[in-house]
Amino acid sequence: MALGACGAPTVSLRQGPRAYTAESYEAVLQRWTREGHQYQLQGLDDLIAVTATYESWDFRWAYVVRYAQDFRLTTPERQELLQHPPESAQQEHEFMALYTQSRRWGELTRPTSAWRVLLLNDRREEVAPVAIEPINRPGAVELTYFPYTTVWRQAFRIRFPKYLRSPNRGEVEVIDDRVRSFSLRFSGPLGTTDLVWNVTPKPGVAL
């Protein structure tokens, strides 16, 4: 059984300024975070338990506001972070993902991993990661801003390209204005777990 978005709120991909305060961060983090489990048929032991946050425009805005308060950044410093996001954020989709399972099978960067990770949309278009970076020793930043981090869970930053090559449409965005959902999929011989983000339709966009 795979669980990903039961009761999860829809999200908006709209960009632009937000009226967030540092206290808004927890609610925004929850809105962009999904959890999934894959259980053994014989019992309730987890084969895999995944938690992932999609670092969207909306999430990054809330993160910067909270970060700026915690580190007592000046107003110009905060504005610089808000107006000029990292280049990777403009070229890639990034997720912070943590999960539990066998360390040997769960190391996503090694051939012994029992899981393959993909990003896919509701048009069944999918892309593989361009980078998977293990966070071997989560520090104060990870433990504070991603509170589901623990020493018992493996942590990774997973980055996907924003565009893919389509046989019929050329280069297309994986997550564009027309998607109604997108998923982070962990699949392998032990099963499949999908973490799903349902998207609020953008006004005026034809399906």
Image: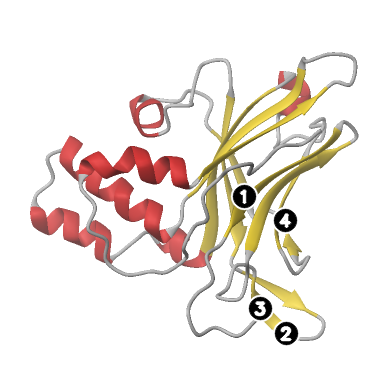
**Element type at mark 1:** strand
Q: Which residue does the numbered mark 3 point to in the structure image?
A: 172
Q: Is residue 67 visible?
A: no
- How is the rendered protein coloured? secondary structure
Amino acid under disc 3: Val
Q: CA gap, disc 2 to disc 4?
A: 18 Å
Q: Which residue does the numbered mark 1 point to in the structure image?
A: 131
How crowded is the residue under tag 1: few (<14 C-alpha within 10 Å), some, or many (20+)? Answer: some
Q: Earlier in the sequence, mark 1 or mark 3?
A: 1
Amino acid under disc 4: Ala
Question: From the viewer's perspective, is residue 163 above or below residue 66?
Answer: below
Amino acid under disc 1: Ala
Q: Which residue does the numbered mark 2 point to in the structure image?
A: 170
How crowded is the residue under tag 3: few (<14 C-alpha within 10 Å), some, or many (20+)? Answer: some
Question: From the viewer's perspective, is residue 169 above or below residue 90?
Answer: below
Residue contact at pointers 3 and 2, CB within 8 angstroms: yes
**Element type at mark 3:** strand
Q: Could you tell me residue 191's position as x and y percent?
A: 86, 35
**Element type at mark 4:** loop
Residue contact at pointers 4 and 3, CB within 8 angstroms: no
Camera-nearest label, 4 or 1: 4
Q: How many marks?
A: 4
Camera-nearest label, 4 or 3: 3
Q: Could you tell me residue 55's position as x and y percent?
A: 46, 51
